[in-house]
Amino acid sequence: MNRAPLWLAILAALSPCSQAATDNLDELNLEDLVKTDITSVSRKSQSLADVPAAAFVISAEDIRRSGAQSLPDVLRMAPGIEVAQIDNGRYAVTARGFNGRFANKLQVLIDGRSIYHPLFAGVMWELDPIPLDDIERIEIIRGAGGVMWGANAVNGLINIISKHSRTQGGAAVNVTAGSKGTGDVYARIGQSSSDSTTWKLSVQGRHIEPSKLDDQSGKSTDRLNNAVLDLRLDHDIGGGRDLSIWANATRSRINDNWNANPTFSPSGALSLSAISPLQELHNESLVGRYRWLSDSGIESSLQASFTRSGIEISNFITESRNTTDVDYQGRYAIGRHDILWGLNYRSSSDEIETNEPYIAMAGRSYTQSNTGIFIHDDWTLIPEHLKFGAGVRADQTSANGTNYSTNATLLWTPSRTDSAWLKYSQAPRTSARAERDVSIIAGVAVVPSGFGFNMPVFTYANGNPHFGPEKAQGVEIGYRKQFSSYVSADLSAYRYRYTHLRTGNMVGQFACNAAFGPLYDPARCSYFGLAGLPVMFIDTLTSNGLAGWSDGVELSAEWMVAPNWRLQLSYAWNRLSMDGSSNPGIDADAEITERATPRHYGSLRSQWNITTSQQFDLWLRSTSGFDRQKLVDLVPNASRSITYDHVPGYVTLDLRYAYRVNKDLEFALIGRNLLNSQHIEYISDFIPTAATSISPTWMLNTRWTF
Amino acid sequence: MPSSFGEVTTEVQLKAAYLVNFLKYVEFPGNRTSVTLCLFGRDSVGPYLARYEGRQIAGRELHIRKVSSPEQLADCQELFIPDTEESRVPAVLRWVGKQAILTVSDSETFIRDGGVISLVRAEGRLQFEVSPEALGRANLKASSQMLRLARQSSGGAR
């Protein structure tokens, strides 16, 4: 594609007088204002000047103009949020390091309902929790937010706020079809049955054909079939009271590709072949929220939700779960204080069946409960200029006892266009069911046995019923400045200390052949079906043994080059420095954790309204590379040192050109991942999975409202 | 002139211009030499209003302040509540009570909630609606020119 004419056109659009002209707004009177056309790029909701935390808002317009079809792809625009696509449906998403397939330090809420899964700890991103078209905005707060958002908001919070049904009247159909068998259909109807009662119902189906394996050996098995149905009903009672009800059902069906099927040659040499288990997820939620205003001016919100969910991975695990959550929040502003408080009760009961020996689960069912209480005050010390905030929360959990979260903030606004903030916070991550109760073969390496043959050594990771909460505390500092009506920037830096992080302690070993003498354990070997074979096992026990520091800097900046052209830059730098240990297992884990963290993330978005009916958007994004420990390494390695795969850094580009035929019909051509014929973003960190490559996709999108 | 430079303007700049302009068309009780525009909560217009601070608007000196609690409203003549704080509108209007404060918001339900002026996006323009009932409750008088330029209110006050 020859881009020169395009760039010339963009430069031409940069007429110098357009900026000067808007300064004359002061001279305008009301008569002129009502006649002024807005053809500008919206900046709706980008209003964070007085939040004493590293925060970022993604608006509905940002989502639409990104061209992204899945939620994690949208999150890439926020500085400090690290997103790596694993396959067509799976993603690893974290804030500020410690990324993983089940990254466990990021809390995600949809209209106040948590989608953080208590079995594995983390979010199952392959399940579309809500259609992207139904999202009003996404607020992202990096850093510990345990006081307000509860345990597990350790590195950050993603708060997804759906559109009010009032704004979704009528009907809409949104169809996307593209290369690689990509298809996405969204349909919505909504109605205002009276002035105060409105509802909407939306459905979305998403399909992607299997992607290519990175090793060029053919196609993967990650054919994605997702469906989501979302109903919202709002009733405005008046007098500051309103009632909202959400009903949501979502399903995801995608195979995985594991190099985990062992075969032994007659000589005992191990080889692994791929198996392709089918993974089916479902989730049904019913949520009700009532908000009211008392005569004394206390604002209250009571929300209750019931969720039924399940995970089924064929021949591996079947889980079904019922979760009840009741949450009250109150707010009262008096004098110079703005006080928030809340009470939360959550109970989650599961029933789990596993296929041993691949995976074993202690206890077929378990009910995990959590009761939390918090209070937070924002205290204006000097009106206009200085605010102090402090909060504390206690969570009583069935598995982890009582945990505390605290925070303290200082917000200084020397002028209308500058603000600086300082924050201390502390938050726990409570242990997940799998960390306490699951035992699983975690990896295999091959060592020369000394008897003339190579011997596989399996690592068997045992869950620990006494595994406790992980802890984090740290300080952050930030500065925001609006340089002019056209340029603003937001800079933050942090240093966090993590302790009690999950790791594995080596607790024993056994061999499966009588030649090993006292190490021979025939009972356990026959459990694994390996009795008599020349293999060894190392037992590890999940423990709270890892600690370290995380440092980073994040920048986001915005430049309205012209009123119809907006540029947004974001950049994040993060470094983990884990403590060494005299325990070789923990010392190795420290190195594995450090090396698995990409140092740099960058993104530059351009939104250009060519005319009132044409938009051209461009998104350049990049990350540096990282190293992933090989879970499976069949190359004999006498020193038993850890071996790594390298995931290279990448730069890629997304484009979108949209043409609005009239106010009800729009066509868009979307290209994603355009700069490389293929790249990988991730190699599995939990089960040896064949890496899939990400290649350019072109899509045509039609939006029709009627 | 307006037609030439009015072609491209950002929404937030327009909101800021509206907030300042309303002060020219509304009569506040007493003989004032200054007028205070208060911004509630997480608003995005603040930085765009910075340059209006201290200016003479209809012969009165303009001050701009951020407010977050009821007691701070005492010397506000105009109060802007952004749509990001929509859920708090009823509470904030309760704080305002019958004080002579011109309340303005870009929240869609603002007039229905009892606010005075609602900024609405319509046909690619930013326009405004006025609730005469709420204006009366606040004991404020708006010029006939302003009422003529206002869009017909879609929902009545409750």
Image (spheres, coloured by chain):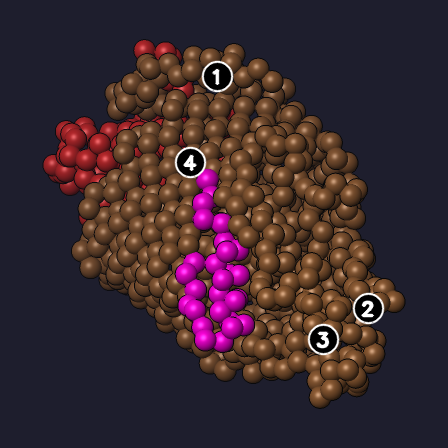
Identity of the residue drawn at 53% across and 42% down: A649
Name the chain under label 2: A
Q: Quadrant of residue A141?
A: bottom left
Q: Nearer the viewer, residue A318 or A359?
A: A359
Q: Quadrant of residue A557?
A: top left
Question: Dot 4: few (<14), some (14–19), or many (≥20) neighbours within 10 Å?
Answer: many
Range drawn in magenta: A576-602
Residue A99 in sight from this viewpoint: yes
x and y percentages locating residue A112 in the rendered image: 53, 59
**Comparing labels 4 and 2, the label whose residue is closer to the camera:** 2
Identity of the residue drawn at 32% across and 20% down: A19
Residue A268, which numbered label?
2
Q: Which residue is mark 4?
A: A569
Identity of the residue drawn at 22% across and 32% down: B51
**Comparing labels 1 and 3, the label whose residue is closer to the camera:** 3
Identity of the residue drawn at 44% across and 24% down: A565
Residue A536, which numbered label?
3
- Closer to the chain start, of discs 2 and 1, is 1
Amino acid beneath label 3: Met
Amino acid beneath label 1: Trp
Residue B42, which numbered label?
none
Magenta segment: does it hold A352?
no
Q: Does residue A529 lie above or below A555 as drawn?
A: below
